[in-house]
Image: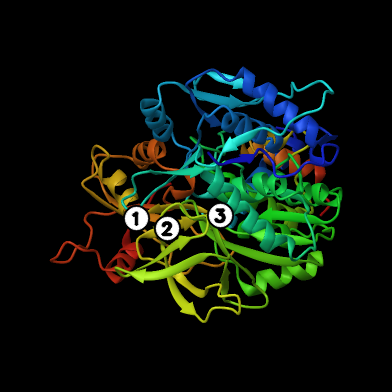
Amino acid sequence: MITLPLLPRNDWHGQVALHAGQTVTLAAFVRDVKALATQLPENVHVINLCTDRYLFALGFFAAALRNTITLLPNAVSAEMYAQLRGEFPNLLALSEAGCNAGGLPELRVTRTGHGAAPLEMPQIPAERVVARLYTSGSTGIPQPHDKRWGKLIANILAAAQAQWAWTQGPCSVLGTVPAQHMFGFESSVLLPLLGGGILLPERPFFPADIAASLAVMPRPRAFITAPYHLRTLLESGVALPPVDLIICATAPLSQQLAAQAENAMHTVLAEIYGSTETGQIATRRTVMTNEWLCFKGIHLTDRDDRTWASGGHIEEAIALGDIIEHCASDDDGRARFILHGRLGDMINIAGKRTSLAYLNGILNGIDGVVDGVFVQPDDEMPGAAARLSAYVVAPGLKPNDILDALRQHIDPVFMPRPLSFVAELPRNNTGKLPRAALQALSAKSTTHD
Amino acid sequence: MSTDQTDSIAFEREVAQLIVEALNLETPAESIAPEAPLFGEGLGLDSIDVLEVSLVVSKRYGVQLRADNQDNTHIFTSLRTLAAHIAQHRSK
């Protein structure tokens, strides 16, 4: 059985994280993980709700050590929680102070490691499933994707090799994205710990908070963020400290915004392309090129009108949700490509993905809704979070009846804005809704207030 | 009603208008109740909206909102709390 170490490093006195203002050494981290692992009950699945990234990491690594799968749902909705509880009656929430665990049994994650005796690095089997992430899938029904320890580590080490090349070595890492979603999980939690850097625990939100947190980071500094956070940060007018690397993902970034960020923070901005299913598979320095360069070992092939990614750390071939144009490989044989937007039905808002088919199914499943359709915004401004709108035929319902029902099922970022009531939808004789007809509707519809 | 109260109500209307414009809301500014929750069940704002609002607030009033003053959630509790925070800290 092949096993891999909890962390691929052995500098016991080296710093791996900062927590509550204190340096956390590798030895202290391993002791914290082992101590938490002994508190985990047998035969549970865990959902990790910690926003403090250090506590999140303790929870994840302790669970992995105990052969306990960490569930990372894609969307936060009452329905998702209910579904997970139905599937896993033994679901346990790993929580921190102030957490709302939605009625789940909780284990409060704290630092309880102690002692000074020499340590051995724990080993975890490469084949062990350590995380299960959920995506909407093409049908809109959440699809689980299991991540095995060995592949996950390979994923992060490939990312570390690509990213640390910009900074000539590992960085301290601060993120504005949640640890619970794939990009934040990979880049803000696993990258610093597995890639030899320093994990910073906070998740600053307002621009002034982000600037303050960046200013006190040890150099070199890597800043993990998403286009809409980056745009508000740059537009806010707060004074920005220099950083050594910005890693940005979840939605395409314009070259203009990338250049603005590089100038304002005297840095290199590397974008990441990936998905929950594949993990991170390609990167580019956005100001230099519109071509993405795949990580070593990743293959892209066209089949059945889709582009499939395979090889490297990818568990099994995955159909990508984007339109891809292949370019010539680089000298190392690494694949290159250009992105031409999403496939028709897929939606990505603020890094959260779903499909129109799923949203329309939910809308039309509401009692009293005769017909209804979600519509994507026309032009997506890169860096802005464009909103969906919806048209609905529902004579007996009030706007709030529909919004309340939707809120039970879908993530808040997909809530329609506006929601328009119409007498009927302009379906053509095949039952489809031509986009032009929908746009004509918007002029005469009444919107909710 | 005192002048202060009249002023703060007028300022709440101004901030309501700013929110509606910043977020392209269909809701008329005057229908945002001063004490109704801005999040979830009320106006239905989410964290993306909060960032947008914080941006226009910084541009218009010179107030950089901070989360670590213990007021992160309190500031956005309602139109009234947000307007009061801005009024107290504005530099323009």
Residue depicted at x 37% and y 50%: A137
Q: Is residue B64 left or right of residue A425?
A: right
Q: Quadrant of residue A238?
A: bottom right
- Vertically, is A18 above or below A282? above
Report which residue position mark 1 lands on: A356
Residue B10 can be seen in this image: no
Residue B23, labelled with which disc?
3
The reply to whether label 3 and label 2 mark residues of one chain is no
Query: Where residue A421 appears, x then y in whole percent?
Result: 31, 51
> Pointer 2 indicates a residue of which chain?
A
Instruction: Tell me the amino acid under the disc marked 3.
Output: Leu
Confirm or deny contact between disc 2 and disc 1 (CB under 8 A).
yes
Report which residue position mark 2 lands on: A347
Q: Is residue A396 left or right of residue A151?
A: left
Residue toward you, A405 or A198: A198
Q: Quadrant of residue A273?
A: bottom right
- In the image as oriented, which residue stretches furthest toward the front? A1
What secondary structure is marked by label 3?
A: helix
Q: Is residue A22 left or right of residue A380?
A: right
